[in-house]
Amino acid sequence: MPYCRRCGAQIEENARFCHKCGTQVVNYFTPTAPIKSKPIHKDPFLLAVIGLVVILVTSLIVTVVLVVPVSPWNISESFEDKNPNVKTLNLNFDTNVGQVNVATMKIGENNVHILVKADGARGILGETDVPVTVSFDNQTVGDVLTLNSKVQLDSKFGSQAKVVVSIYLDPDLILNLNVSSTTGQVSFTGDKPTEIRYLNLETTTGTVQAHLHGNLTVAGNISLKTTTGEVHYRMSELDILENCNLNLQSTTGSVYMDLTQTRLTQGNIKVDVATTTGSINIGLKIDEVGAIIRSQVGSFGDIFAETKNFSGEKNMLQSNNYPAETNIEIDNTVSGFGDINIQANYQSDATAA
């Protein structure tokens, strides 16, 4: 029991005052040892992950700020050749990015007129120079003009730039054309009396198309190719001076051909159409010339044909006048997945003798 701190009298437990002298009782408590808190366990792997995330997020923010397009640029340049007495043009044109449009059209006194338009934007730290270079090398020997031209876009600006190239050719010239683009559409329009000795249009990623009509003359081979994209070829009432080959090819994409020839030609036309993954679509209208269409598809493809005055199985069709004096021979091949669709019309009811 506790005792009074003044008179020494014994007092009751929990008493607040001494019953003898009235002094207030002071209670003493035995201190307890403090409870130590458990230290936080720092996982090295977790800390490393957090640090890496912080670094990546910071880098991403800095990159976006530096690369985001903020400074626009654009160019518009033209190149011409006016050498007199030119009769034949050999054109080799290539671009790594951009749409290329070629047409038979007389611009002033030019044999060739090339117009390059491009625009885009650069980031904060981008170079100040325009990221497009154009080369134009023209040489004339006798009456033959050879033109080598190239448009090159800096690869850093590929996804932010738009490039369009327009090429105008004097329709009075004999044309040998080789035009290509790595990424972009390539097209040719011949709608004036022009003689084509060679035509090659090609792209890696994009559409290739050619429209030939308007009493245009063909005296050589024609080829349209793309790796990833479609091929569109249309030809109507051409003057075919000699036997020629037409090659239409797409690896991943469909091919569309629309061919009208109702008058006799001076040469045969051999057509090869091929796809790996994509359909082949043939529209054919003929008279006087004959035609045969052979088709082959893969295991998962089929052949569909609508014909008039044609006979045979759908994989081997021929006009009722085949073989004629001159003929169109078409071979269709789908080596992977895709169908072949044919619409063929021989306008006359005549039958070959």
Image (cartoon, helix red, strand yellow):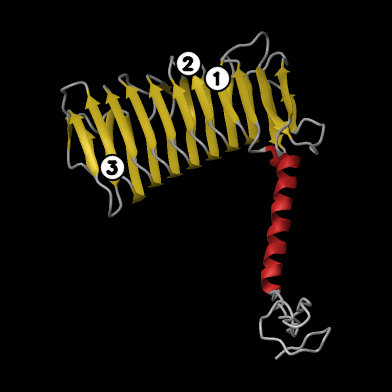
Residue 18, quarter of the rendered image: bottom right
Q: Could you tell which of marks 2 and 3 lies nearer the N-terminus?
A: 2
Q: Percent position (x, y) of residue 207?
A: 49, 34
Q: Classify mark 1: residues with Cα within 10 Å, few (<14), some (14-19) or many (20+).
A: some
Residue lying at the far front in this picture: please name it: 20
The residues bearing labels 2 and 3 have C-alpha atoms spaced at a distance of: 30 Å
Are the two marked residues, 2 and 1, in contact with CB atoms closer than 8 angstroms? Answer: yes
The three-letter amino acid code for the residue at tag 2 is: Asp
The residues bearing labels 2 and 1 have C-alpha atoms spaced at a distance of: 8 Å
Residue under numbered circle 1: 103
Front residue of this view, candidates 127 and 254: 127
Identified at 74% across, 41% down, the residue is 65
The residues bearing labels 3 and 1 have C-alpha atoms spaced at a distance of: 32 Å
Give the structural element (helix, strand or loop) at label 3.
strand
Q: Percent position (x, y) of residue 264?
A: 33, 21
In the drawing, does residue 236 fall left or right of residue 160? Answer: left
Q: Which mark is residue 230?
A: none
Give the structural element (helix, strand or loop) at label 2.
loop
Q: Classify mark 3: residues with Cα within 10 Å, few (<14), some (14-19) or many (20+).
A: some
Q: Could you tell which of marks 3 and 1 lies nearer the N-terminus?
A: 1
Identified at 70% across, 74% down, the residue is 40
Tell me if residue 308 comes above or below residue 60 in the rendering: above
Front residue of this view, candidates 78 and 262: 78
Front residue of this view, candidates 166 and 234: 166
Confirm whether residue 289 shows in the render.
no
Residue under numbered circle 3: 294
